[in-house]
Amino acid sequence: MNKLSLFSLSMSFISLMIFWIVLSGFLDVIHISFGVISVASVMYVNYKLKTHRFFKDDMDDLSELRFGWAVYYFFWMAGQIILAGFHVLNIIIRVKMPIKTAIITFKADLPSAHAKMILGNSITLTPGTLTLDIQGDQFTVHALDEFSYKGIISDDMPKQVLRLFSSEDRQVVSDVKVTFKKSIV
Amino acid sequence: MSELQIILSVFLIVSGILLMLVGSIGILRLPDFFSRTHAVSKSDTLGIICVIFGLIIYEGFTQSSLKLFLIILFIVLSNPVGSHALGRAALKKGLTPFFSSDEKEEDKL
C-alpha cells in the first residue's frame, strides 16, 4: 500500500468532474454540488483499488508520459487503424481470401508495465493483429497475414511507444520468432 | 445545418454500415476462432467509429456530440481489452490456431 499524491488525486477529481458536467449539462449550484458529492464517493470507493500495486513498476499517475508525443501518437494510431482496417476488409471480400495466419513471439524492452499495456492495446487495436499473451517481456501475437505484422517486427510501432516515455532511441523488439506451422506451437 | 455537413455525415454513416457488413461476412468466411476475432472486433470497431463520427458531424458542436465522443473513447478503450481477453482465454485453454500454410501442404499430399 502506498499513498496517492495530491497531484494524482486532484487530476482524477478534475477528470471525473468534467465527465459529470458533460453528462449532466447543467451548470447551476445544485447540480454541481450533486456532482461533487458523487465524485467524492466514487473516489472513496476506488481508493483501495488505486493504491494497490499490480506490478512492481506500476505508477500511480502519468508523470512519466510526455504529453506532446501522446497527442502525436493518438493521430498516428488513428491513421494506422484506418490503413490496416482497409487491408483486412480487402482480404475478407477477395474471393481467394489470401490469408497467411501466423503466431509471432518477441521480447520488448520497455521501461514500465504501462508502456507494455499501451503496446499490447495498440497491437490489438490495429486490425489484423491480436495480442494473445504478455508474460514479463514476452509478447505473443496472432496475425492475419504478413502486411499486418510488418509494422511490429520492423520495430516501428514499439519505437513509437518508447518515445511516449523516454527520449532515448534504441532497439525495442528482440528475439522475433514467426510461426507458420502447427508443429512448433 | 449546411449541405456539406449533411453530405459528410451521410457518407460516414453509410461507409460505417458497409464496414460492419463486411465484418459480418468475415465471421462467416474466415477459418478459425482467432482469425474470426480479427474480423469481428476490428472491422466492427472501425464501422461503429465511422457511424458515431457521422452522427457527431450531423449534430454539430453541442452537448450530445460531446457524449457521442465519449462513446467513441470508451469503445476504443474497451474493445482491445475484450478481444485480448477472449484470445488469451482460448490460448490458455489449449485451442491450437489454424495455420493456412498447413492446409496448403495437405493439399499437395
Image: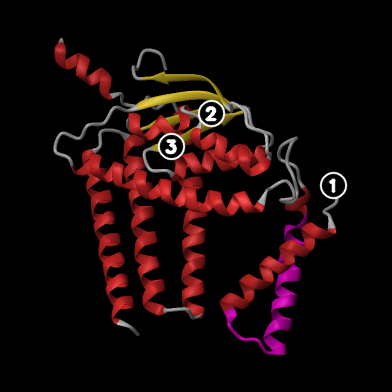
Quadrant of residue A94 within the rendered picture: top left
Q: Quarter of the image holding residue A178?
A: top left
Amino acid type at image mark 2:
Phe
Q: CA distance from mark 3 to mark 1?
A: 34 Å
Check if mark 2 and mark 1 are on a common chain.
yes
Q: Give the amino acid type for the residue marked by disc 1 in the picture.
A: Asn
Q: Residues within 10 Å of mark 1 (few under 14, many from 20)?
A: few
The chain identifier of the residue carrying mark 3 reads: A
| Element marked by disc 1 | loop
Point 39% across, 60% down: residue: B49
Image coords of residue A160 (percent x, y): 56, 40
Work out whether A86 lies above or below B18.
above
Q: CA distance from mark 2 to mark 1?
A: 29 Å
Quickly name the residue at label 2.
A139
Q: Position of residue A108 (x, y in %)?
A: 58, 28
Point 38% across, 43% down: residue: A127
Q: Is residue A103 above or below residue A58?
A: above
SS label for mark 2: strand
Q: Nearer the viewer, mark 2 or mark 1?
A: 2
Whichever of labels 3 and 1 marks the residue nearer the N terminus, that label is: 1
Main secondary structure found in the magenta portion: helix
- Look at mark 3 in the image and give the residue it sits on: A130
Which segment did they paint magenta?
A: A24-47
Dots 3 and 1 on the same chain: yes
Relative to A34, A140 lies left or right: left
Could you tell me the amino acid type at mark 3?
Answer: Leu
The residue wearing badge 1 is: A2
For the point 32% across and 71% down, the residue is B9
Q: CA distance from mark 3 to mark 2?
A: 11 Å
Chain letter of the residue beneath label 1 in the structure image? A
